Image (cartoon, grey):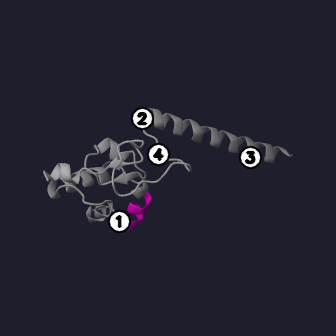
Amino acid sequence: MNDREKLAGAILIITVAAGIVTGMLGREKTGRTLPGKNQKETSDSCDQSRHQYINLDINTATREELMALPSIGPTRAGAIIDWRDRNGPFEEVEDLVQVKGIGNKTLAVIKKYICAGGSDRLSGE
């Protein structure tokens, strides 16, 4: 191995290590973990016995909980909550596309982490 290859290898190792540390710090900060390869994806209904971050209920989730989802930052989280406050609970996760800033691509990214439970409870039925 020449010096250039050794340097490239060292940079790669440092980059990977930094990514691992960043991921670990992010998980400690939020207390959330998203499902790994071996964890089961959710259906549309919320099963509260499952890990709380796999079945995040979009009808009761806080801004911070929504922001822990991939592709959801403060603006989108606020838009979800604003829509929910104005229109009532989401009947199904696909209803999220009615929220400004949430399209089919974003829905596809977060769908496996969310559910639309609590709609009966929130609507008073």
Q: Amino acid at mark 2?
A: Gly
Q: Which mark is residue 31?
A: 2
Q: Which mark is residue 22?
A: none
**Mark 2 vs 1, N-terminal side:** 2
| The one of 13 and 58 positioned closer to us in this rendering | 58
Q: Amino acid at mark 1?
A: Gly
Residue 21 location, x and y as percent? 56, 35
Identify the residue under disc 1.
103
Residue at point 41%, 36% (across, down): 30
Residue at point 53%, 47% (across, down): 36
Answer few, some or many: residues within 10 Å of disc 1's Cα (few below 14, many 20 plus, some between 14 and 19).
few
Q: Secondary structure at mark 4?
A: loop
Range shown magenta: 103-109
Identify the residue under disc 4.
34
Q: Nearer the viewer, mark 2 or mark 3?
A: 2
Question: Mark 2 and mark 1: span between their CA atoms?
Answer: 27 Å
Question: Mark 2 and mark 4: span between their CA atoms?
Answer: 10 Å
Identify the residue under disc 3.
8
**Mark 2 vs 3, N-terminal side:** 3
